[in-house]
């Protein structure tokens, strides 16, 4: 086993243990604080896509994202505003999908700066409100993480075994359509298990889980697109074997607000 793979496994196990302890054994407020810290760290890394190199500039950019997130959370105390903000996030991810499909090579510093807010603010909002749902918010967030991990692992091994046709060669050459299909099948299996676990109607729940898995791929590819624009392999180096915080939550940035919106819109909150 290579040292890189060993570091990747150890980091993944430590992160998984931390997430389980926080979500299952600690008050929701702890998770909410950690979400804000993660969004700040991700904002710091996204500042690299904006080509901000000075420490004060990167700190200012990350602080700006957290400030806007705080304002969004204040508005979202009103359920109507929460739904409006989540719908706006859904619209953004549709735009991101079109961007990836049509003009993945386009985008300068200004675009990267704006997109950082569009990606990270709804992500923080979705995660914070998801974990606060009663009575199962923390379990739902853990389930979402398992769903995204299943889709990611399925895509990885499916792509390695069967991958032939590139999914997005100009953005992420390693991803294939076969891997994508395997990831969606893995997400479907977790979706069926979730319907039984939460005792919710199977088909609406499965539809939501598949939609979330699909959108998570857009989140992953969007970060990859901006990394490619600035010639970066990883967004950072905070997590040994994994890169930066953004490299771990890129799928989640799209999945979290989509999952929360789906729960509210379909009336599926367990």
Image (cartoon, rainbow, N blue to C red):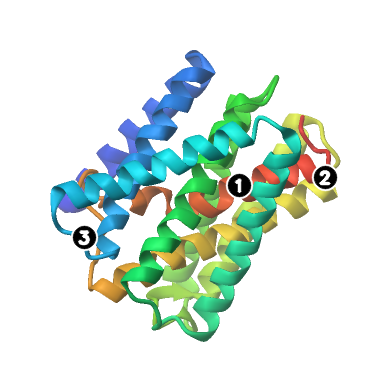
Left or right relative to 212: residue 197: right
Left or right relative to 153: residue 186: right
From the image, tell me which residue sits under label 1.
257
Q: Residue at x 59, y 36 (%)?
A: 143
Quick one: label 3 or label 1, which is nearer the N terminus? Answer: 3
Q: Nearer the viewer, mark 2 or mark 3?
A: 3
Q: Nearer the viewer, mark 3 or mark 1?
A: 3
- Look at the image and tell me in which quarter the C terminus lies: top right
| Neighbour tally class for label 1: few under 14, some 14-19, many 20 plus, Cα within 10 Å | many
Q: Residue at x 27, y 46 (%)?
A: 60
Residue 235 screen position, x and y as percent: 27, 57
Left or right relative to 41: residue 80: right
Q: CA distance from mark 2 to mark 1?
A: 14 Å
Residue 179 screen position, x and y as percent: 51, 69
Residue 223 screen position, x and y as percent: 40, 63
Q: Secondary structure at mark 1?
A: helix
């Amino acid at each position: 086993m290579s040292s890189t793979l060993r570091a990747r496994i150890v980091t993944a196990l430590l992160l998984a243990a931390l997430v389980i302890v926080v979500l299952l054994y600690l008050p929701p407020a702890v998770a909410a604080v950690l979400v804000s810290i993660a969004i700040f760290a991700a904002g710091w890394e996204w500042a690299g896509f904006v080509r901000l190199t000075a420490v004060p500039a990167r700190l200012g950019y990350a602080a700006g994202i957290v400030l806007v997130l705080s304002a969004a959370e204040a508005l979202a105390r009103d359920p109507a505003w929460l739904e409006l903000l989540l719908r706006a996030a859904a619209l953004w991810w549709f735009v991101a999908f079109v961007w990836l499909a049509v003009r993945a090579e386009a985008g300068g510093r200004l675009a990267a700066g704006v997109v950082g807010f569009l990606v990270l603010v709804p992500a923080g909002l979705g995660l914070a409100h998801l974990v606060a749902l009663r009575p199962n918010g923390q379990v739902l967030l853990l389930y979402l993480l398992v769903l995204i991990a299943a889709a990611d692992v399925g895509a990885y091994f499916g792509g390695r075994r069967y991958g032939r046709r590139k999914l997005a060669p100009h953005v992420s050459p390693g991803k294939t359509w076969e891997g994508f299909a395997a990831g969606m099948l893995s997400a479907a299996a977790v979706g069926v298990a979730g319907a039984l676990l939460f005792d919710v109607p199977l088909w609406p729940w499965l539809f939501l889980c598949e939609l979330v898995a699909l959108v998570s791929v857009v989140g992953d590819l969007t970060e990859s697109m901006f990394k490619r624009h600035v010639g970066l392999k990883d967004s950072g180096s905070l997590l040994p074997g994994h890169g930066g915080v953004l490299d771990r939550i890129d799928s989640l940035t799209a999945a979290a607000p989509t999952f929360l919106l789906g729960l509210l819109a379909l009336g599926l909150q367990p």
